[in-house]
Amino acid sequence: MNAGFKNPLKQINLKQQIVLVFLVLVIPLFILNWYGNYRTDQILKRNVSNAYIELNKQNFKLISRDIESINKVTSTVFQHPTVQQLNPDVDNSMLERVKNYERLEGLLNSYSQEADQQAPLFYSLFVYDPSNSYSFAPYYPESMKAGVYFFLEEEKPEWFDEAVAKKGNGYLRLIEHLSPPVQGQKNQHTLAYIRAINNIDRGGTIGVLVVSNVDARIGESLQTVSIPDGELYFTDWSNRVLTSSASGVGEVLELPQDGEVLSSGIGAKDIITSDFIYVVNYNEVLQQKLIYKVPLKALLQQQNEIKRIILLISVAYFVVGLIMILYFWRALMTPLQRLVYFVRRYEPGKVVPETPKWRRNDEVSVLISTIYEMARRLNSLVHYKYQMDIKQKEAQLQILYQQINPHLLYNTLESIYWKSKMEGNSDSAEMIKQLSKLMKISLSRGRELIKLGEELEHAEAYLKLQEYRYEYGFRVTWDVPGELHGYTIPKITLQPLIENAIIHGVKQMGEDGEISIRAVLQEDRIEIVIEDNGYKPVNFAAIHKLLNHESPSPSVGYGIRNIHQRIRLHFGPEYGLEYAVRDGGGTSVTITLPRKELSED
């Protein structure tokens, strides 16, 4: 079935494909335009709702910040010594009471000054004075202003006992303007922050602090938000309007589905009806709500403007797309057809014709010139590879020729060994035998990787030569299990490390010196550890830099770096050398190798 299927795109040429691409790009655009107009109402409502939710959150933070600032000031007034020392029941002289009154007046007036061009807040302290000790002070303010006021039982404000019952917790409340009630006239409301002030030392209530004109301060925060033909309300938990950008302060605002409060009691949500979008921010802790009432009519007018703009953009897109197709039809097809003709006829090694000249310097011209240049470089690479193959054969012949001399030296050493053995020169014969082993393993038939057993034999031969030559008294211990001898290691890895342990570690220690070579199998890797108990200080930081940095210090030496690099070259960056301090003093170097057996080729 699949064999009979034919891709229709393979049956049309590039020009037809360009037309098809144009139709694929344009037709969905008009379909999306129609579908977008159909769904714009819902999408617009949702996007506007989300935007107003974020705006409402920021607006509510500003209002909460103003209320928190008022709370901090009231806390300062709460703790002020002048307020805490106020006690109408104490039998003070008239002069002392007048001075107390003046100090309190000055304190509250100082906090009631206008700041940062914001609406002023008026701090007023109401004190219950049953004995009429402060009869000279006013019982009600003549207008909304700061001050301290004393009252008798029959003149007690309706909110006084309510504030005392909250035990010093401040709250917002609508109260009538702080002035005596006038018979037959309805007083206006003002939003106030009310907080009872308790005596810290002896307990009991000193009075109630009232911060009035809070609605003006919150109104400034509401004025920072612009909602076309919309309304903003700041209410308590029962939807009673505390302040708003419209009328209705003191009235209860009707909200659709307001019973579905957020589960956390804090946060913002939207309520979308056929006429309005309500954005409500709840704060159950403060018992407050900030409500945006956005009419949909104004939004739909903006939506029609957006539809017209989208339609104009679609038409412009169609015209521009048509012009671009016509341009590419003429400017792209001709050079590409010539390029296809050249690529089909080109064969590596043949002479490349001169690159066609074009009057423009666009991507097509760069592509054509690059392909021509690529063909020329390919011809050069073909010629270069041919030359390298010849040189490689010559190098292999040269290497085979140069191996004749080491083999001749090895065979000669074998002859000298047997002659010395027959003549009774045992020490000389043994030294020649060990040197012969070094030569044999170093050659390793040209191999770079050998078995661990061969490398151990090479290291033992080196140690025996050193013992014969210098008569060292240090001890060497070996702990390499036989089952590890068949695994792979780069040749001449152990000998330089053992030489370092002798020269820089135990050379001058005599019988106290000790070198330990051991190997263990760790899951998928082998760890070979060479340790010495040398007493000389070792710069491990310099060794670490030598092994791992691109530009190490030449003063440290390159022997161990070469070993480290050869191991990584053969097995990967997770293997190599690692130097550390030996337990009990001295140096420990760990060789990490993969668990890999050497194949017999």
Image (tube, rainbow, N blue to C red):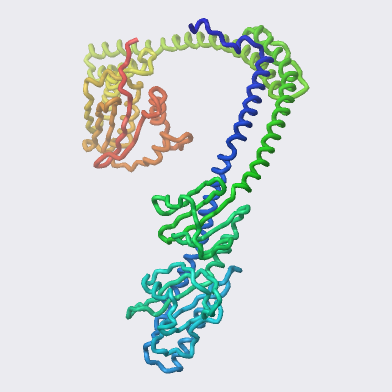
Q: Residue 600: give x, y in percent of width and height.
A: 32, 11
Q: Residue 475: give x, y in percent of width and height.
A: 22, 32
For residue 499, say whether it is visible. Answer: yes
For residue 431, say whether it is visible. Answer: no
Task: Give the residue at x 45% y 79%.
Answer: 126
Furthest-right residue in this view: 359
Q: Residue 214: give x, y in percent of width and height.
A: 52, 68
Q: Quadrant of the C terminus?
A: top left
| 206 relative to 397, above or below | below
Foreground residue, 311 or 500?
Answer: 311
Tell me: 481 left or right of 560.
Answer: left
Q: Residue 490: give x, y in percent of width and height.
A: 36, 22
Tell me: 526 left or right of 54.
Answer: left
| 74 relative to 237, above or below | below
Task: Give the residue at x 47% y 89%.
Answer: 99
> Count of labels shown?
0
Task: Give the residue at x 67% y 14%.
Answer: 14
Foreground residue, 76 or 129?
Answer: 129
| 159 relative to 10, above or below | below
Foreground residue, 201 or 359?
Answer: 201
To which quarter of the image does residue 231 belong?
Answer: bottom right
